[in-house]
Image (cartoon, helix red, strand yellow):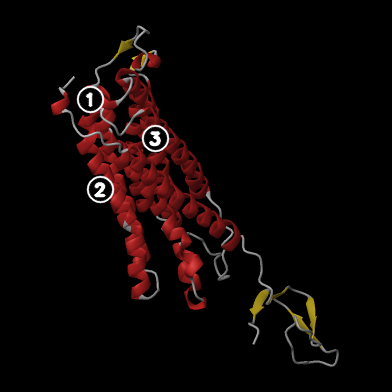
């Protein structure tokens, strides 16, 4: 142990870590709830990408609970100032192993959700191949990383319980696998961030709104930057003062996860800000597929002022508040419609 004169200041970064992680979690929760509201009640098109993002939010919450446990164990303080440094370091090692699995698996679910959303925006064979071509290597390397972290000691409890004799692999092995997985994650982040901007830029809306969309989608690039920073801090996991040096990597890993979840929800919230003239454009941005020839999205109930007439159906010209006034063209005051069509009008 260093002499008192050489001791670092007794800084406690734990409260700051909790403040940052839970603040971003609140934003993520609100974003996912608004997304569900739009998809269920506004456009009535709740898909697999939405299911995945809800599951992802659950993983994000679990991850932040684990981070809070790490802070309670002493993360954010120097080992020298902890009452039981060895015990604290072992507890943080335990929670960190759990958090690594939650973080990389949750981030993977986020990217798959974004990929499924993009396939709702642009349905083409080449684009589908490109999306899965980017996500498949990430899925494989993430799965390998989860196995390496979860099986680095047999039994895994030997990692944080010295009294248990077990077989453990080199600490460098999970770190090296993390570098490979992170490289594929950065590639996927770049593809999934740029693709919706390119697709949505062609939508017929004002330039101001297009710029606003691009700014919101740039959150994905911030997640990419956080991922790159995580690589720079990975060596801190093997430092001697691990309870203090682990803070940056945990923080940027959580930011990557949280920002990715928030960015995944941004384009789906566009219907909240649509005007009547932007209706079809914002429907496209929200990933809703219209019925061919109808001009109306699938799974949407007819509006109050929409009237359908089917073959051999008669409509009376005597109108009420909810009927279309029709001019009589025969003595029976009836009009026979021979084809199926829809008429819409707006109240004055």
**Residue for badge 2:** 225
* Residue in the picture at 56% in, 62% down: 43
Q: Where on the picture, by quarter, is residue 171?
A: top left
Q: Return the x and y of residue 338 as percentages of the image width and height.
A: 72, 78
Q: Quadrant of the N terminus?
A: top left
How far apart are the two marked residues, 2 and 1, measured between alpha carbons? 23 Å
Q: Nearer the viewer, mark 2 or mark 3?
A: 3
Mark 1 neighbour density, 10 Å: few (under 14) some (14–19) many (20 or more): few
* Residue in the picture at 51% in, 61% down: 289
**Residue for badge 3:** 67
Q: How many marks?
A: 3
Question: Label for residue 62?
Answer: none
Counting residues from the start of the chain, the first of labels 2 and 1 encountered is 2
Q: Residue furthest front?
A: 5
Secondary structure type for disc 2? helix
Task: Please say if 86 is above or below 269.
Answer: above
Secondary structure type for disc 1? helix
**Residue for badge 1:** 238
Mark 3 neighbour density, 10 Å: few (under 14) some (14–19) many (20 or more): many
Camera-side residue: 1 or 219? 1
Task: Please say if 150 is above or below 259.
Answer: above
| Mark 2 touches mark 3? (CB < 8 Å) | no
* Residue in the picture at 26% in, 32% down: 244
Q: Is residue 98 left or right of residue 235?
A: right
How far apart are the two marked residues, 2 and 3, measured between alpha carbons? 21 Å
* Residue in the picture at 40% in, 31% down: 72
Secondary structure type for disc 3? helix
Task: Please say if 253 is above or below 170.
Answer: below
Camera-side residue: 340 or 168? 168
Q: Return the x and y of residue 138 as percentages of the image width and height.
A: 33, 38
């Amino acid at each position: 142990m260093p002499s008192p004169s050489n001791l670092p200041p007794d800084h406690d970064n734990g409260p700051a870590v909790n403040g940052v992680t839970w603040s971003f979690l609140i934003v993520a929760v609100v974003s996912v709830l608004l997304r569900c509201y739009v998809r269920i009640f506004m456009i009535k098109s709740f898909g697999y990408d939405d299911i995945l993002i809800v599951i992802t939010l659950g993983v994000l919450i679990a991850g932040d609970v684990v981070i809070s446990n790490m802070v309670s164990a002493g993360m954010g303080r120097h080992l020298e100032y902890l009452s039981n440094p060895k015990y604290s370091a072992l507890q943080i090692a335990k929670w960190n192993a759990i958090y690594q699995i939650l973080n990389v698996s949750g981030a993977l679910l986020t990217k798959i959700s974004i990929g499924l959303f993009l396939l709702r925006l642009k349905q083409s064979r080449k684009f589908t191949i490109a999306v899965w071509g980017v996500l498949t290597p990430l899925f494989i390397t993430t799965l390998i990383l989860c196995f390496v972290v979860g099986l680095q000691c047999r039994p895994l409890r030997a990692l944080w319980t010295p009294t248990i004799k077990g077989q453990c692999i080199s600490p460098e092995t999970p770190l090296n696998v993390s570098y490979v997985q992170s490289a594929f994650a950065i590639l996927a982040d770049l593809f999934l961030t740029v693709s919706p901007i390119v697709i949505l830029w062609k939508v017929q809306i004002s330039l101001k709104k297009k710029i606003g969309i691009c700014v919101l989608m740039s959150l994905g690039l911030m997640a990419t930057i956080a991922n790159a920073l995580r690589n720079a801090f990975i060596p801190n996991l093997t430092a001697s003062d691990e309870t203090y040096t682990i803070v940056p990597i945990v923080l940027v890993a959580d930011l990557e996860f949280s920002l990715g979840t928030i960015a995944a929800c941004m384009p789906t919230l566009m219907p909240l800000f649509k005007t009547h003239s932007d209706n079809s454009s914002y429907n496209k941005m929200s990933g809703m597929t219209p019925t061919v020839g109808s001009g109306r999205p699938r799974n949407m109930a007819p509006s109050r002022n929409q009237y359908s007439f089917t073959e051999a159906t008669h409509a009376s010209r005597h109108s009420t508040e909810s009927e279309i006034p029709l001019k009589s063209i025969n003595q029976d005051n009836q009009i026979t419609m021979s084809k199926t069509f829809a008429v819409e009008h707006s109240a004055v």
